[in-house]
Amino acid sequence: MNLTDYNEIRGLLARHGFRFSKSMGQNFLTAGWVPERIAESAGLDRETAVLEIGPGVGCLTAQLAQRAGKVLAVELDRSLEPVLAETLAGCDNVELLFGDVLRQDIPDLVRGRFGEMRAVVCANLPYNVTSPLLTALIRSGCFETITVMIQREVARRICAAPNTADYGAFSLFVRWYTEPELLFDVPPHCFHPQPKVTSSVIRLTRRAEKPFEVSDEELLFTIIRAAFNQRRKTLPNALSAGLGTERSEIERVLEDCGLDPKIRGEALDLDAFVRITDGLDSFRRKKEGYLS
Ligand code: SAM
């Protein structure tokens, strides 16, 4: 059966009483080249195990199964169970798990199902959970690469450079842990039902090492979030509001870092945020030492 031919899968879905759910982000691929190209982009081989989120009717799952050693596909919608039992009947290296991926203990799942195999993620993600899901997948540290289709708007934010409207805290978070690449766009007519927006496929490759040494990683992300929470404000104003620190202290730290105190967060790259974090951290330590 051609799993991207909607005329073919319509009958199968109707037979099992399936109804598309918007809240589960169910836009299924109906253009054969797309799952093939996504699977090709994931860099698979028989020593690799893939976590797929949301197999739907299994069009991408089947492509992954042809290339990888093992595929674990987590699907929230139980009504797809009999559908997938038919469409993936010949794929012995696919394991299906029904449940909410956001409720899974990802490291535990990977350890238990993939053992020592190289682990990657490859999926056409449900758009309503893109950010929390990507955050959890990246934070888990389990995956060498994460190749996913998401809304183009989110893909642009992830891959954005400083001084652009798309650049923000999420770009910096992703960049701290991975090297992101924008691979290709997929127009709405390649899905059923058609989404309102264009989609993009991105690949995030885990960094072997953090891009920079930083004295306090938690403080780094607190500073980044504070800078972009009030992105129209200058950095001293945004950070003094977000961190509860005196504005003059922030200005001194920025001067020590050779940065203009009128600068905004959106103009700074990761390196500059790291320098500000180290500067503020050492300023606080000196102050604490002086006070005690
Ligand atoms: N892979 C299929 C394709 O490309 O045609 C379907 C992709 S569709 C965009 C997203 C899939 O994710 C749906 O099958 C949906 O039921 C499933 N899904 C939505 N939320 C989920 C969650 N929290 N955990 C696991 N699967 C989820």
Image (spheres, rainbow, N blue to C red):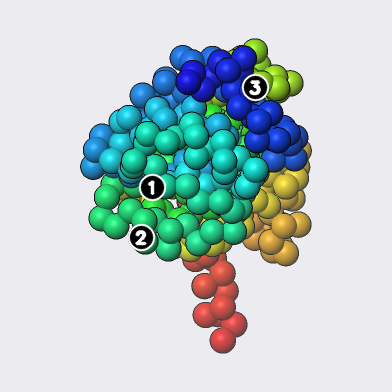
Q: Element at badge 3?
A: helix
Of residue 205 and residue 58, the one placed in the foreground of this image is 58
List x then y, in percent, for residue 46: 24, 38
Identify which amino acid the numbered label 2 is placed on: Arg
Residue 9, by quadrant, is top right
Of residue 148 and residue 74, the one placed in the foreground of this image is 74
Residue denoted by label 3: 10
Residue denoted by label 1: 143
Image position of 112 (left or right of 29) = left
Identify which amino acid the numbered label 1 is placed on: Phe
Which of pointers 2 and 3 indicates the residue nearer the eye? 3
How many other residues sit within 10 Å of disc 2, few (<14), some (14-19) or many (≥20)?
few
Identify which residue is drawn at 37% across, 61% down: 112
Residue farthest along the front direction in this orientation: 15
**In this rendering, does residue 245 appear at all?**
yes
Q: Element at badge 1?
A: loop
Which of the two labelled residues, at mark 2 and mark 3, occupies the earlier sequence position?
A: 3
Image position of 288 (left or right of 207) = right
